[in-house]
Every structure is written in structure tokens, then in C-alpha cells.
Image (tube, grey):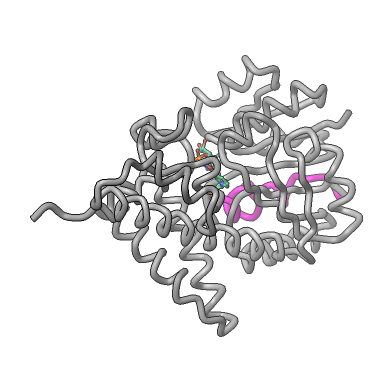
Amino acid sequence: MATVAFIGLGNMGGPMAANLAAAGHQVTVFDLSAAALEQAQANGCGTATSAATAVKDAQFVISMLPANKHVQQVYLGEQGLREVLAKGTLVIDCSTIASEVAISVGESLREAGIRFIDAPVSGGVGGAKAGTLTFICGGAEDDVDEARQVLNDMGKNVFRAGDIGAGQIAKICNNMLLSVLMVGTAEALQLGRANGLDSKVLSDIMLQSSGRNWTLEVYNPAPGVMDNVPSSNDYQGGFMVDLMAKDLGLAQQAALASGAATPMGALTRNLYQSWSQLGHGRQDFSSIFNYVKPQQS
Ligand code: NAD
């Protein structure tokens, strides 16, 4: 069993740290939120009053933070972990951030003798709670292999996409595709409704036809078609519109930098950005179903 420091205990990090503790690892956590720390303690984790104290004696440091600036601050900012981590520590950043930020944080840590991999996840809050996440890693093969001893207790798949930063690229490719599938599915279900079809009946038909996709299988955006999904819970919980808009922005930055054409990704970024600006940023991303609702004349 390993000694692990876990930084960032939000919707994803909270249950991930709990699963590590339940598997028998010695887990010390830090978050800016006192409520999150209290919950982690109830879940069997030790708590610390700062990130710098949480990482004392840690073999692995895992972070699950919102975006670029939080990761840069925790590792490279004032009193950042770069200054206190022992040489040889393996840092596993599971946040979804820009590939170039992962590369620059990794490079800066490497200069201080600290190892780094990016390991963003797929599987959502349900996967974090169930311990069935998919980790999409970028980094040296040996480091990714070593990380498996903790990642396997939080997920069921660990992929290595390539060197540092490659995990982030694979992750945003996946989320860009997911957003296109979600918007397309929402549109099809609204078109059916506007023409008198029941969403459950149409979903069953499309699930056995060529429109079948992940959103129809496990994350239907129409309220009442499935139990235990955000659409049947007023679009609460799950993966926020603002986080999807962030990931689609990262995808567009990567597309610009590489010269790739991503017309559907550009469209979904704009749809999610406008939906956020209309006040739905904290709802689950399947709430885009209501954005494509036909207007009453
Ligand atoms: P969240 O906002 O629920 O949690 C982030 C946590 O980080 C918060 O508890 C916050 O207090 C903490 N934090 C921020 N700055 C900190 C600091 N300096 N030190 C310590 N703690 C700090 O976000 P989340 O939904 O858990 O997502 C985390 C990451 O995972 C994001 O990059 C997101 O894109 C990605 N992700 C989320 C999902 C999902 O379904 N929610 C799925 C896959 C990937």
C-alpha cells in the first residue's frame, strides 16, 4: 500500500480519495473547502492544513483541480509544491487542463527532480464514486506503470496516450466528440417530440438503430427517460456546462495550434458557451436539451 497526498476534493476528487482510502492506502488530503475536508475525514482520509503539509512523506501526489491556473498555482505558485516535494516523488495530475500547461508544469517539476504524469479521467461523478474511471495518461512508460498501483483502485482502465501532455489531448478529443453526440441526440429527441413522438419510445428505436451512442445508452438528456441521470434530477450533479465549455475551449486552442479543422467542435463550444451565458453554467451538460427546444410561436 502507498502513501498518497490528494489535493482537490470536489465532485470528482472527493470520491476518488475515498476509494483510495477504502483500498487501504494511507491518504492525506487538502482542499480549500472545510466541508470537503470534513467529508474526506469521514471517508477515512487524514487531513492537512495546506497542500505543502499534505505531501510530507508522500510517494504519490494526486491532484484533481478545476483548471490551468489552479494546477499552476498548486505546483509552481508561491509556496508551490515544487519547493517542498522530495526528489523522485511521482505527481499524477488528473485535472483536465491544456496540454501545454501539463507539459510546462511537468518540465518545471522535472528540473527539480520530481516526476510528473498527466492523467485526466473519463467516467464522470458516477465513475468516480463507483471506482470505474478511465485514466488517460501522458508520461514516461515507467511512471505510468508505477501510477497503476493507485490508479487501479480508482478506475478500471488505465491508458497511456503518449508522452506528457498526450493524455490531455486524448481527453479533449473524447469530450469534443461527446459534446457533438450530446447536442445531436438532444436535437433528434426534440425533433421527435415536436412531431408527437414519446422520447422513451424514440430512444428505444434509436438505441437499436444506427443513431445509437453513449448518451442514449447511459445518459439520456430527456427528463424521465432514464432514472439516476442528471436529466431526471433537474440537471443537477454530473458534469457542469461550464466545465464542458472549458474543455471545448481547450479543444479549439489545440485545433488552432495544430491547424486541425474541427467545425463541429467549434459549433458545440459556442452552443455550450451561450448556454452558460444564459445562466445554465452550473447545470449538467445534458441540459443542452432545453437549448435546442423548438420555440413556441
Ligand atoms: P469541482 O469544482 O467540483 O472540484 C474542484 C475542487 O478543487 C474544489 O473542491 C476546490 O475547492 C478545489 N480547489 C481549487 N483550488 C484549490 C487549491 N489551490 N488547493 C486545494 N484545492 C483547491 O470540480 P470537479 O467536477 O471535481 O472537476 C475537477 C476536474 O476534473 C476538472 O478539471 C474537470 O474538468 C475534470 N472532470 C470532471 C468531470 C465531472 O464529471 N465532474 C469528469 C471528468 C473530468
Q: Quadrant of the N terminus?
A: top right
Rendered image quadrant of residue 46: top right
Residue 198 in sight: yes
Left or right side of 50 for 242: left
Quadrant of the displayed image that contains ligand 1: top right
As rendered, which of 30 and 253 lies closer to the eye?
A: 253
Residue at 62 percent across and 43 percent down: it is 123
Query: Farthest residue toward the top?
Result: 42
How many numbered marks, from 0 up?
0
Horizontal arrangement in the rendering, residue 240 relative to residue 198 (left or right): right
Residue 156, picture quadrant: top right
Q: Is residue 85 in the magenta section?
A: yes
- Foreground pick, 34 / 189: 189
Q: Residue at x 42, y 48 (%)?
A: 285
Towards the viewer: 202 or 252:
202
The percent coordinates of residue 58 (x first, y second) are: 81, 36
- The stretch in magenta equals 70-87
In the rendered image, residue 226, in percent from the top left (x then y), is placed at: 45, 33
Where in the figure is residue 68, as x and y percent of width and height? 55, 57
